[in-house]
């Protein structure tokens, strides 16, 4: 029904297609706005990725790209500045290109590594039943990561991690060699090493939310948005690629609160 009258499915489809053929443009703010930002991206098979930026409960910008890389994130941060947003700090899943982009463009502002993503990464590689004692001990540390609420708990966690590091440093550096007379080798306990390295190289970014009120410790909320969006896309699976992309842009644009 449109204004009290019935219309055919083909008429409705043409009206929706007029929107899906023309992506929305984000609106510029009337004055500068300081924001604590969350950023995350999700892929849609082989045809691209949407990057979404959120402050609190408000989605403020998104962009659809072929893949996450330095130049795409650089463009997004430039666009946010152009729209009138001044970023006080960022929480992200720690994608390498996003880390380097924000480091280059933020002027040293805090970048919190999402603790949910960090914990999930660790648990996936270690599994719930690690084969080694080192893995089992590291899994216990990982599971406590997202429970830290104050500085005392932070110091206890850091000391526990430091103790693990001292006890198992030789273990994570252990190498295996190919028995063919060559010098080919690999790290014997590669998954434990990956989890350890992911924590060790980002310690300064795990608990910044304790220092900065407004900086969130995870990107939760965006994951739920991605799940809901993908359910919507399944209903419209027959759309052409460019219309699917514009549907994604309209989906987030209609959530903007500016």
Image: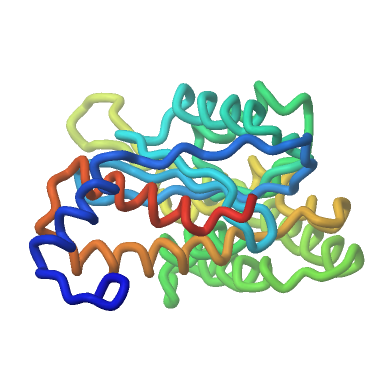
Q: Residue furthest right?
A: 152
Q: Which residue shows up at 42% across the image and 54% down it?
A: 191
Closest to the observer: 161 or 56? 56
Residue under the image location 54 percent in, 44 percent down: 61
Q: Residue at x 59, y 48 (%)?
A: 60
The residue sitting at the front extreme is 4
Determine the residue positioned at 30% across, 39% down. 22
Q: How is the image coloured?
A: rainbow
Residue 129 spot, x, y in % from top left: 42, 77
For the N terminus, the image quarter is: bottom left
User: Disc count in the image?
Assistant: 0
Q: Quick check: 159 above or below 102?
A: below
Residue 164 in the figure: left or right of residue 212: left
> Eyeballing the image, is 79 above or below 138?
above
The residue closer to the viewer here, 242 or 206, is 242
**x then y, percent, for residue 18:** 23, 46
Q: Is residue 212 left or right of residue 180?
A: right
At which x and y percent is residue 139? 56, 69
Asked whether the viewer can see residue 198, the reply is no
Query: Of 195 and 34, which appears nearest the observer?
Result: 34
The answer to whether residue 15 is seen in the rendering is yes
Q: Position of residue 98 (x, y in %)?
A: 54, 35
User: Vertically, is 76 above or below 13?
Assistant: above
Relative side of 138 to 241, left or right: right
Which one is nearer the viewer's eye here, 72 or 24? 24
């Amino acid at each position: 029904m449109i204004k009290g009258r019935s219309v055919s499915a083909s008429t409705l489809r043409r009206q929706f297609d007029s929107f899906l053929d023309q992506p929305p443009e984000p609106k510029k703010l009337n004055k500068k706005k300081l924001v604590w930002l969350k950023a995350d991206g999700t892929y849609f098979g082989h045809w691209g990725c949407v990057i979404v930026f959120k402050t609190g409960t408000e989605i403020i910008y998104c962009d659809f790209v072929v893949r996450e890389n330095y130049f795409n994130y650089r463009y997004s941060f430039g666009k946010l500045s152009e729209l009138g947003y001044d970023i006080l700090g960022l929480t992200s899943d720690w994608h390498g290109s996003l880390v380097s982009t924000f480091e280059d463009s933020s002027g040293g502002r805090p970048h919190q590594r999402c603790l949910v993503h960090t914990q999930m990464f660790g648990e996936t590689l270690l599994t719930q039943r690690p084969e080694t004692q080192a893995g089992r001990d590291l899994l216990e540390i990982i599971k406590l990561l997202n429970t830290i609420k104050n500085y005392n708990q932070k110091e206890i966690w850091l000391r526990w991690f430091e103790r693990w590091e001292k006890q198992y440093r030789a273990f994570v550096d252990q190498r295996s060699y190919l028995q063919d007379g060559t010098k080919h080798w690999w790290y014997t306990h590669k998954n434990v090493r990956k989890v350890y390295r992911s924590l060790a190289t980002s310690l300064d970014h795990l608990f910044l939310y304790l220092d900065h009120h407004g900086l969130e410790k995870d990107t939760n909320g965006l994951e739920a948005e991605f799940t809901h969006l993908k359910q919507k896309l399944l209903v419209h699976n027959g759309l052409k690629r460019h219309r699917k992309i514009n549907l994604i842009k309209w989906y987030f644009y209609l959530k903007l609160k500016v």
